[in-house]
Image (cartoon, rainbow, N blue to C red):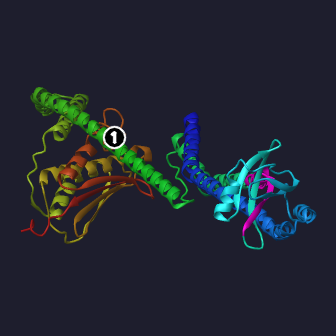
């Protein structure tokens, strides 16, 4: 994963830099190169024209004294005038020719004869100066020719001023070298500026974003990218965070679905188990109901016999107690597993609670416990099945009786929607770890043979049938509290 992330980082950085070089730096460099190339061409033409103009000016400067000297036939003055050109500028040679092209005088390196060229003829025909490149004594020269006029205004000859042709390219080459060096330096500055600008403005933020992504790829799904850097990078970071939030939300929903599926499977298994237990319980009730009734009936008849001593009577009483326990166990199985055929009708809570407490009073007196009932004089009506509700209350009261030391308290209250029945005991209480499992079928804290673990499960089932629920908790002053909450009758149902 780290190798893949490093490769992705390098490719991303190189790709962005390559794009900047291709689409920003390269076009600028090429455009500047074309500009320099065009500028150098213009500069070359300007330099060449300037040098030609210099020769023309020098030629015009000496044409008048040379023409006057020729008119006077003073060849010495002609030679002095020709020699002066080397003082006026960078001249390689100067010479004077007659109108036919024969050299009259010269200084430096020039043409020896122009009679076989078209230059004298062009000058006589046009009366204007001429230019030409030629090779003299192994040297490549540039020559500028100007006509010489006599006093009558007729062309009496021509003057030639020469300089080396390499002089034209020497200055240009220096300028070109300087221009291309400046262009190279400019290109390096642009390249460095773009690369540094990319790193400072984008690259380092992209690298930081890739580090955030690497942490997420390593398994830290709770990590979120910082929303800093340019707007585009910050948008990418925000998109990454939204994607991670969506993944986290999807994982939470998936976990919730899995938990719900697990709970559903558990309920299905419990239902299947309850169906099996119900079938077994019905079979037990069918097979044991009649024999247990026969045993209990015969034991009662034997108890009425006068021939039995006290020990035999105690044995018969023990037999009847065990038969009663078996009968209650079978009845609890039937109460929990039989389909709940609820027949709701409008009930008075006070009458229902009074009936249940009166039914438990003999057991309370036999165990030496005191029942304290705290119930208001008037309670709202409720709708439910009186038999199922009485069964639930008897189970709660019996559990409180078995757990109490001296007193069982029944506290009744009501709000706008629910009836609250709280049954409290002063016993030792229960471990907190067991409170969540007490409502499960067949879970009991009693000793073997003293309970089936179905009493509270039956109460929970009855509460759900009537739109309520059962909560168990330990009291701060000791003992347990069973809170049965039942839905009251709505306005329309109370009619």
Residue 69 appears in which quarter of the rendering?
A: bottom right
Residue found 54% across the figure and 51% down from its top: 23
- In the rendered structure, the answer to whether residue 196 lies left or right of residue 218 reads right
* Above/below status of 482 relative to 271: below
Residue 18 appears in which quarter of the rendering?
A: top right
Question: Is residue 172 located in the magenta-colored stretch of the structure?
Answer: yes
Q: Is mark 1 on a helix, strand or loop?
A: helix
Residue found 80% across the figure and 50% down from its top: 111
Mark 1 surroundings: few (<14), some (14-19) or many (≥20) residues within 10 A = few
Location of the N terminus by quadrant is top right
Front residue of 127 and 432: 127
Front residue of 89 and 270: 89
Stretch of the chain drawn in magenta: 154-176
Residue 211 drawn at (x, y percent): 58, 46
Residue 55 drawn at (x, y percent): 78, 62
* Above/below status of 412 relative to 319: below
- In the displayed orientation, state which residue is furthest to the left: 495
Location of the C terminus by quadrant is bottom left
Residue 79 appears in which quarter of the rendering?
A: bottom right
Would residue 305 be visible to someone looking at this image?
no
Question: Is residue 136 located in the magenta-colored stretch of the structure?
Answer: no
For label 1, the residue is 258
- In the rendered structure, the answer to whether residue 290 lies left or right of residue 66 reads left
- In the rendered structure, the answer to whether residue 4 lies left or right of residue 435 reads right
Residue found 31% across the figure and 44% down from its top: 439
């Amino acid at each position: 994963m780290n190798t893949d992330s490093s490769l992705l980082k390098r490719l991303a950085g190189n790709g962005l830099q390559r794009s900047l070089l291709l689409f920003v730096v390269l076009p600028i460099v090429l455009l500047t190169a074309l500009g320099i190339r065009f500028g150098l061409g213009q500069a070359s033409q300007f330099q060449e024209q300037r040098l030609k103009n210099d020769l023309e000016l020098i030629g015009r400067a000496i044409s008048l004294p040379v023409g006057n000297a020729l008119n006077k036939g003073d060849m010495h003055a002609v030679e002095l005038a020709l020699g002066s050109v080397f003082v006026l500028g960078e001249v390689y040679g100067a010479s004077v020719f007659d109108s036919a092209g024969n050299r009259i005088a010269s200084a430096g390196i020039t043409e020896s004869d122009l009679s076989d060229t078209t230059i004298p003829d062009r000058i006589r025909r046009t009366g204007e100066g001429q230019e030409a490149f030629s090779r003299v004594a192994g040297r490549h020269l540039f020559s500028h020719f100007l006509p010489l006029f006599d006093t009558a205004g007729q062309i009496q000859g021509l003057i030639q001023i020469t300089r080396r042709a390499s002089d034209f390219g020497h200055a240009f080459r220096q300028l070109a070298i300087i221009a291309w060096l400046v262009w190279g330096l400019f290109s390096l500055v642009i390249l460095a500026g773009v690369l540094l600008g990319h790193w400072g403005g984008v690259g380092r933020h992209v690298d930081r974003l890739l580090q955030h992504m690497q942490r997420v790829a390593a398994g830290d799904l709770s990590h979120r990218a910082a929303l800093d850097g340019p707007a585009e990078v910050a948008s990418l970071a925000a998109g990454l965070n939204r994607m991670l939030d969506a993944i986290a939300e999807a994982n939470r929903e998936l976990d919730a679905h899995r938990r719900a599926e697990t709970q559903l499977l558990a309920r299905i298994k419990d239902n299947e188990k309850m169906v099996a237990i119900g079938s077994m319980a019905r079979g037990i009730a069918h097979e044991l109901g009649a024999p247990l009734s026969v045993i209990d009936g015969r034991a009662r008849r034997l108890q009425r016999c006068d021939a039995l001593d006290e020990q035999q009577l105690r044995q018969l009483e023990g037999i009847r107690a065990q038969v009663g326990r078996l009968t209650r166990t079978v009845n609890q199985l039937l109460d929990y597993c039989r389909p709940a055929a609820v027949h709701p009708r409008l009930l008075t809570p006070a009458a229902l609670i009074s009936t249940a407490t009166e039914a438990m009073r003999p057991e309370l007196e036999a165990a030496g416990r005191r029942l304290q009932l705290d119930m208001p004089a008037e309670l709202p009506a409720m709708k439910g099945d009186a038999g199922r509700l009485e069964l639930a209350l008897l189970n709660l009261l019996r559990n409180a009786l078995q757990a109490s030391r001296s007193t069982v308290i029944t506290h009744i209250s009501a709000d706008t929607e629910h009836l609250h029945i709280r049954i409290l005991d002063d016993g030792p209480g229960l471990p907190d770890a067991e409170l969540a499992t007490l409502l499960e079928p067949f879970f009991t804290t009693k000793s073997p043979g003293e309970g089936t673990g179905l009493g509270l499960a039956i109460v929970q089932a009855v509460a759900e049938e009537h739109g309520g629920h059962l909560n168990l908790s330990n009291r701060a002053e000791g003992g347990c509290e069973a809170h049965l909450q039942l839905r009251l009758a709505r306005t329309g149902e109370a009619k």
